Image (cartoon, grey):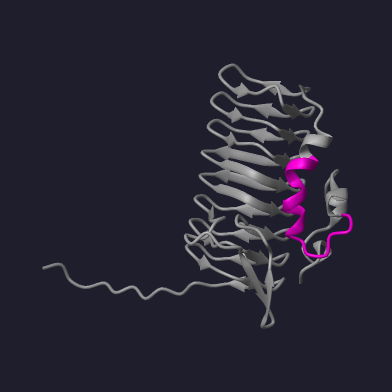
């Protein structure tokens, strides 16, 4: 559960070569800033509506709509037929795949979204990779740095792997669905086709094809 192929169908992005020769999936994040710069062809082929702000170092593909109030700072590559909705904030070193959604009050920074990824409401995605057709519910936060600034360590089957990354949010596999207001702590790894209930505070590695449940105890008493 450490290779890119363990999490992603690499045919679901035009930029699969960023993973060439990568042993540990998080190492693609180390390449991302240079990769975006080298593949960037600035220009707008989609529609930027009045009131949106798009820097010169941004590429916007055909059929993509950038709504009023969105802010796109480069370098960034936005694919075809995307929705960049009102209030979205792209901070740079970002790739957004074809057909993806970046919604109201969502912030992306050093992020790679496969085709069809959906980040529609009030989410933060930093130093992270989201797989094909992955969906983040409203208010999902991906924490990308420890309070004590140390390299993030991922533990798999009792073996510790030093990622050598001070900032590393999450690797979320294809077709995952993360429930509203969940928090993914630094170094989160979620295998494909996994569903996570709302309000989960997650840390560590989750296998593929799982349901992560959160159980609450609720007590209702007479009002005095």
Q: Is residue 180 left or right of residue 217?
A: right
Looking at the image, residue 83 lies above or below residue 118: above
- Count of all numbered marks drawn on residues in the image: 0
Q: Picture coordinates of residue 47 (x, y %)? A: 70, 21
- Magenta segment includes 22: yes
Quadrant showing the N terminus: bottom right
31 or 96, which is in the foreground?
Answer: 31
Lateral position of residue 55 relative to residue 183, left or right: right
Q: Residue at x 52, y 50 (%)?
A: 138
State the residue in front, 208 or 152.
Answer: 152
- Residue occupying image coordinates x 62% and y 43%: 109
- Residue 219 in magenta stretch: no
Percent across and percent down for residue 22 are 84, 60
In the picture, residue 145 is in which quadrant? bottom right
Q: Is residue 155 above or below residue 82?
A: below
Q: Farthest left residue?
A: 224
For image coordinates 89% across by 55% down, the residue present is 20
Residue 73: % across, % down: 63, 30
Q: Is residue 111 visible in this depiction of the protein?
A: yes
* Region rendered in magenta: 20-35
Residue lying at the far bottom of the rendered structure: 158
């Amino acid at each position: 559960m450490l290779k890119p192929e363990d999490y992603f169908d690499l045919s679901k992005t035009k930029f699969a070569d960023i993973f060439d020769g990568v042993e540990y999936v998080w190492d693609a994040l180390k390449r991302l800033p240079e990769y975006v710069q080298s593949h960037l062809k600035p220009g707008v082929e989609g529609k930027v509506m009045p009131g949106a702000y798009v820097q010169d170092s941004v590429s916007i593909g055909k059929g993509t709509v950038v709504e009023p109030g969105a802010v796109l700072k480069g370098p960034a590559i936005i694919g075809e037929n995307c929705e960049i909705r009102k209030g979205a904030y792209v901070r740079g070193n970002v790739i957004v795949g074809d057909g993806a959604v970046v919604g109201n009050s969502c912030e992306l920074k050093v992020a790679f979204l496969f085709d069809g990824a959906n980040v529609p409401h009030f989410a933060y995605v930093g130093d992270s990779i989201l797989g094909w057709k992955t969906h983040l519910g409203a208010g999902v936060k991906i924490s990308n740095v420890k309070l004590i600034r140390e390299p993030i360590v991922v533990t798999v089957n009792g073996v510790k792997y030093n990622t050598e990354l001070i900032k590393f949010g999450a690797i979320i596999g294809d077709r995952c669905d993360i429930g509203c207001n969940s928090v993914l702590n630094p170094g989160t790894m979620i295998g494909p086709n996994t569903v996570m209930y709302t309000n989960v505070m997650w840390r560590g590695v989750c296998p593929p094809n799982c349901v992560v449940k959160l159980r609450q105890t609720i007590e209702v008493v007479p009002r005095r």
